Image: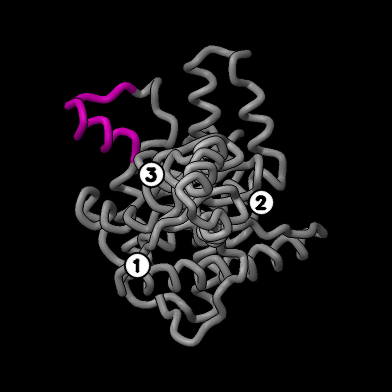
Amino acid sequence: MDVKGRRKSSNVEDRRGMSAGKVGGGLGGVGIIIVIIYTLISGGDAGDVLNTVTKSITQNGQMTEEYTPSREEEELAEFVAVVLADTEDVWAQIFANNDMTYKNPTLVLFTDSVSSGCGLQSAAVGPFYCPADYKLYIDLSFYSELKNRFKAPGDFTMAYVIAHEVGHHVQTLLGYSQKVHSLNGKVSNAEYNEQVKRLELQADYLAGVWAHHVQNKGYLEEGDFAEALTAANAIGDDTLQMKAHGYVVPESFTHGTSEQRMRWFTNGYKNGTLQGGDTFNATNL
């Protein structure tokens, strides 16, 4: 995907190297007071302690440690910022065409774990969207996971992941996410999983809609579409369960099979509109 010299979104919150949900790796407010008292007893300057703490505290009440990203990671951070900008442009236009106003989400970059409106999350859960705070969260090391664990290399695999999570944001703005998650605890687990699966496949469709429009803008390069399909295939429920257990449990699927994920992304890519992605009433997923 061509990103050279293109606009980067300003809606990126960089929390890489920060300790999620802690202050100073567990020092905490009480710990800081104890340190200050000890410093005064020892004849030191409490102001020095406060200055150090103040410089380290972030707007989220977290303390940072010195973090130096690799050159590859910085390039990837710039890449996802351009992808996010593309989603802003595409969805703003699509919403306007449908007499609606699009609200931009924020992309949070983090390492290892992060505090979100949906609670404390580990990087092990992979990229995710939190409807409670309109934010997408991603640990950029997931790119290595895509290449090495899922055998899905290429920069557009990460673009597909970002576009899918933005798709969840679009679903939240349109009310689909709220309807599905309101069923939790009210229907059987199998039925709830079915609705969540349809929500995820719709997000794949919406990612394809985004790809359709960036293709029309001339930003896609040869092989990009194939990279997205490789990623969609690699993270299908049946593929993941077969690799992990040697068998599949269809009633537990929450994202769709590899074939379904590839097909709905392709549908969005070919269609390019909101109207073609009604996975909830589709008889053939």
- Answer few, some or many: residues within 10 Å of disc 1's Cα (few below 14, many 20 plus, some between 14 and 19): few
Q: Position of residue 86 (x, y in %)?
A: 56, 70
Marked residue nearer the N-terminal end (1 or 3): 1
Q: Which residue is mark 1?
A: 68
- Answer few, some or many: residues within 10 Å of disc 3's Cα (few below 14, many 20 plus, some between 14 and 19): some
Q: As displayed, is residue 24 above or below residue 228?
A: above
- Distance from disc 1 to disc 2, alpha carbons, whole Å, reads 44 Å
- Residue found 63% across the figure and 42% down from its top: 131
Name the residue type under label 1: Thr
- Residue found 52% across the figure and 72% down from its top: 214
Q: Residue furthest bottom?
A: 5
Question: In this rendering, would 136 be left or right of 134?
Answer: left
Q: Position of residue 208 (x, y in %)?
A: 50, 58
Marked residue nearer the N-terminal end (1 or 2): 1
In front of the other: 104 or 38: 38
Q: Which residues are magenta?
A: 236-249
Is residue 142 visible from the viewing direction of this image?
A: yes
Q: Which residue is mark 2?
A: 275
Q: Which residue is mark 3?
A: 123
